[in-house]
Image (spheres, coloured by chain):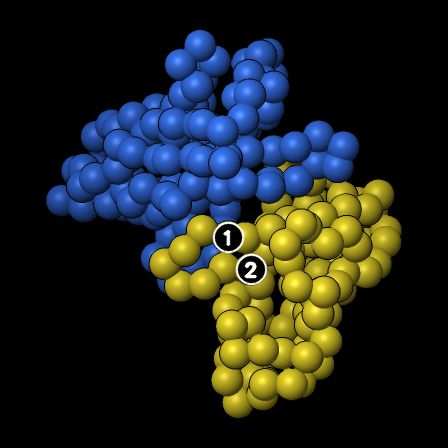
Amino acid sequence: DIQMTQSPSSLSASVGDRVTITCRASQSLSGYLNWYQQKTGKAPKLLIYAASSLQSGVPTRFSGSGSGTDFTLTISSLQPEDFATYYCLQTYSMPRTFGQGTRVEVK
Amino acid sequence: EVQLVESGGGLVRPGGSLRLSCAASGFTFANYRMNWVRQAPGKGLEWVSSISSSSSTIYYADSIKGRFTIFRDNAKNLLYLQINSLRPEDTAVYYCARETERPWTFDFWGQGTMVTVSS
C-alpha cells in the first residue's frame, strides 16, 4: 500500500498569508495526486487533480505542484473562507490512501 | 446537476448490520467507478471500498475486508454498502464519491450518512 505523509498537521495563518502544505508518498504516483478542502460538517471538495490541474470553479489562489513522490498545495493569499482542513489523496493505485490532513487555523 | 445522496445510517449495536445506500442523479451512473469513504468523529478521511462501473472489479480496505460488501444497481442508479459485524471503531460518517478516469480523481461527493455503533 502507498503511504501518504502530509505536513504540517496544523498551521496558524492570517488572511493574506501564503500557505503551503506538502504530501509525500512512499512511492512514485506518476502525478495521480489530488487535493481536497473540507469544512466542518461538510463533504470534502475537490480543489486540485492530477497534481496541478485546478478543478472548475476553484479560485486561482489555489495551486498544486510536484511529481514523483513530493507534492505541494499552495494558497497564494489566504482568504477568510479558506480556513478549513486539507487532505491529499493518491489515486495511482489501490487501495486509495489519504494524507492525515492539515488544519488551517486563524492566527 | 450531479447529486449523490446517502442514506441508511443510524445507531446500531456492536455485531449488528446496516445497509447504506447512495442515490445518484445528474450523470450516467453506469459509466463511473464509485467509492465509499468514511470519517470517524474528529478524525481524517479513510477510503473504504471501490467498485467499477460494471461491478467487475471491487476493492476493500484491509480494515473492513470480510465484513463490508459493496455493490451497485445501475438500472436504479444506486450504490450500496452492506456492513456486517459492526464494531465501535466503525462509527463514522460514510460518504459515497464518484471517481473519474484519466485523470483518476474523486470529483463529486455526497453529504454523508452517520453510522454509530454503540451498546
Residue A43: x, y in percent? 45, 51
- Residue at (32% x, 29% y) in the render: B20
User: Label 1 vs label 2: CA separation?
Assistant: 6 Å
For disc 2, the chain is A
Same chain, labels 1 and 2:
yes
Residue B44: x, y in percent? 48, 57
Q: Closer to the camera, B62 or B53?
A: B53
Three-letter amino acid code at disc 1?
Pro
Please, is residue B92 above or below residue B33 in the view?
Answer: below
Q: Find chain A in the image and tell me its colour.
A: yellow
Residue A70 visible in the current orientation = no
Mark 2 Cα-neighbour bin, 10 Å: few <14, some 14–19, many ≥20: many
- Residue at (71% x, 48% y) in the render: A49
Q: Secondary structure at mark 2?
A: strand
Three-letter amino acid code at disc 2?
Gln
Residue A86 lies in what quarter of the image?
Answer: bottom right
Label disc, if present, on residue A37 of the rendered structure: 2
Chain with blue colouring: B
- Residue at (72% x, 76% y) in the render: A76
- Residue at (58% x, 12% y) in the render: B54
For disc 1, the chain is A
Residue A78: x, y in percent? 62, 78
Q: Are marks 1 and 2 in contact (CB under 8 Å)?
A: yes
* Residue corresponding to mark 1: A44
